[in-house]
Image (cartoon, helix red, strand yellow):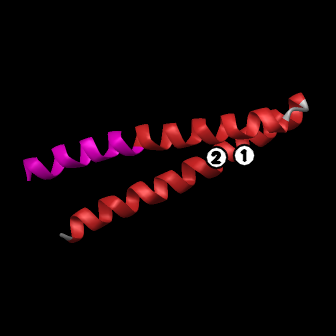
Amino acid sequence: MNENNNKKGNNKSSLVIGMCIGIAIGTAVGVATKNIGLWLPIGLATGISLSFAIGHNIDDNGDDETGDQ
């Protein structure tokens, strides 16, 4: 049961990290193009989607490794 809680915690932390990275990239591109209002939400959405994709990939790999042991 603790293992399931750890996986949920990892998903939440990867989501927060993805959001922060997306906001940073969106802000940087927005400042460069002088259009923060457009690029900030694009960066945020990109960061969230990448964090879900990476988190899902890590969960799949983790399940395979624990099944072999």
Question: Which residue corresponds to the image point at 75% horizontal and 34% vertical from the top-left?
Answer: 39
Q: Is residue 63 magenta?
A: yes
Mark 1–mark 2 CB contact (< 8 Å): yes
Q: Quadrant of residue 36?
A: top right
Q: Is residue 22 left or right of residue 26?
A: left
Magenta residues, start to end: 55-69
Q: Position of residue 40 (x, y in %)?
A: 74, 40
Q: Residue at point 91% right, 32% down?
A: 34
Q: Position of residue 54 (x, y in %)?
A: 42, 40
Q: What amino acid is at disc 2?
A: Ile
Magenta segment: does it hold 4? no
- Give the image location of residue 59, x and y in percent: 29, 47
Which label is found at residue 24?
A: 1
Cα separation between marks 1 and 2: 5 Å
**Tag 1: residue type?**
Ala
Task: Name the residue beneath numbered marker 2.
Answer: 21
User: Which structural element holds mark 1?
Assistant: helix
Q: Quadrant of residue 53?
A: top left
- The residue lying toward the viewer, choosing from 25 and 41, is 41
Element type where label 2 sits in the image: helix
**Residue 33 image position (x, y, % from top left):** 87, 28
Residue located at (55% from left, 56% from top): 16
Quadrant of res 37: top right
Classify residue 59 as left or right of residue 34. left
For label 1, the crowd category at 10 Å Cα-Cα, with few meaning under 14, some 14 to 19 and many 20 or more, is: some
